[in-house]
Image: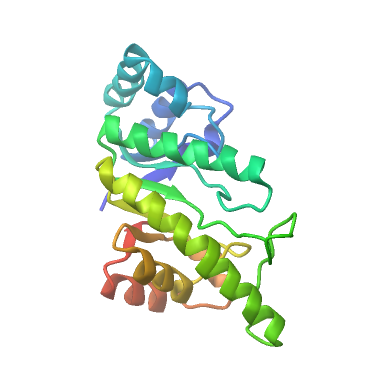
Amino acid sequence: MKLGTLTVALGDLSFDNACKFLAENGVQMVEIGCGGFPGKAHCDAAELLADEEKRKAFMDTLHKYGLEISALSSHGNMVHPDKAVAKAFDDDLTNAILLAEKLGVPVVNTFSGCPGGSPQDAVPNWVTCPWPDDFSQILEYQWNEVLIPYWKEKAAFARAHGVHKIALELHPGFCVYNTKTLLRLREAVGPEIGANFDPSHLIWQGMDPCACIRELGKAGALFHF
C-alpha cells in the first residue's frame, strides 16, 4: 500500500509546485483530476492527448519528484437528463480513459451518474426507496433503460483501450451510492466496474466502512481507496 492524495485540493498551485509539496510531505501516489467536477487545473486530458511533448513533460514532472499516478479522475454525471450536460461529462470521461491508456494508468475514477425519473425530466432524480410504486418505476427506468446500457458501452470502450478498472465513488445523489448498488451495477455490466472507496460518504449514511470493505473486497470490487 502507498500513501496518496487527490491533487485537486492543490489546484491553486502549479503542477510542479503541487508535486514538490506532496513529495516533501511523504506522498507516494497522486490521483489527478482531468475533467468533470474535479476540473483540469493540473491535467487537461484532451490537451495531453493531442500533444506528445506535453504528455512527456507531464510525466517528467511526476518522475522528478518520485511520484506515481494511482488514478485519473473525471467525476461527472454522464447520464444527466440534459443531453448537453451529459455529453460534456461523457467527453471528459472518454478522454480520461484514452489518457489512462497512453500513460499506463490502471484506474479511472468517476461517479455512476443519476438520470432523471423519466425521459421527460430535466434534472436528475435520486431515489432511495422502492415504495410507493412510483419510485420503483423510476428505478426501473433509471437502471434498465439508462444506467446499465450506458455503463455496458463505456466499460467495453475502456476494455478496448486497456483500462480494466473504472472505480465509482459511492456518493449520495448518484445511482451507485452504497455497496449494494455498486455490486448491482458490477453484476450487470462486468468486472471493469468497482469502487473508489471514500469512507466519509458511507459514514454519513450510517454504514460501517469496515463491513463495506469486507463486502467489496470479497467481490474483488475494491479498486481505489
* Residue 129 located left or right of residue 43: right
Give how far across and how far down residue 8 sits, in percent: 52, 37
User: Does residue 177 appear in this view?
Assistant: no
Q: Nearer the viewer, residue 74 or 5?
A: 74
Q: Nearer the viewer, residue 82 or 164?
A: 82
Which percent across, then down, holds residue 85? 65, 42
188 is higher (above) or lower (below) than 74: below
Quadrant assignment, res 41 = top right
Q: Nearer the viewer, residue 157 or 33?
A: 157
- Residue at 51 percent across and 36 percent down: it is 91
Give the quarter of the image for residue 167: bottom left
Instruction: Indicate whether 106 appears above or below 215.
Output: above
**Quarter-of-image position of residue 160:** top left
| Looking at the image, residue 56 lies above or below residue 206 | above
Q: Is residue 186 visible?
A: yes
Residue at the extreme bottom of the image, as rendered:
132
Q: Residue at x 32, y 65 (%)?
A: 221
Position of residue 68 measured from the top left corner of the image (x, y, whole percent): 29, 36
Residue at image position (65%, 40%) is 84
Give percent across and percent down for residue 225: 38, 56
Is residue 191 or residue 10 the one in the foreground? 191
Q: Residue at x 57, y 53 (%)?
A: 79
Q: Residue placed farthest to the top in the image?
A: 53
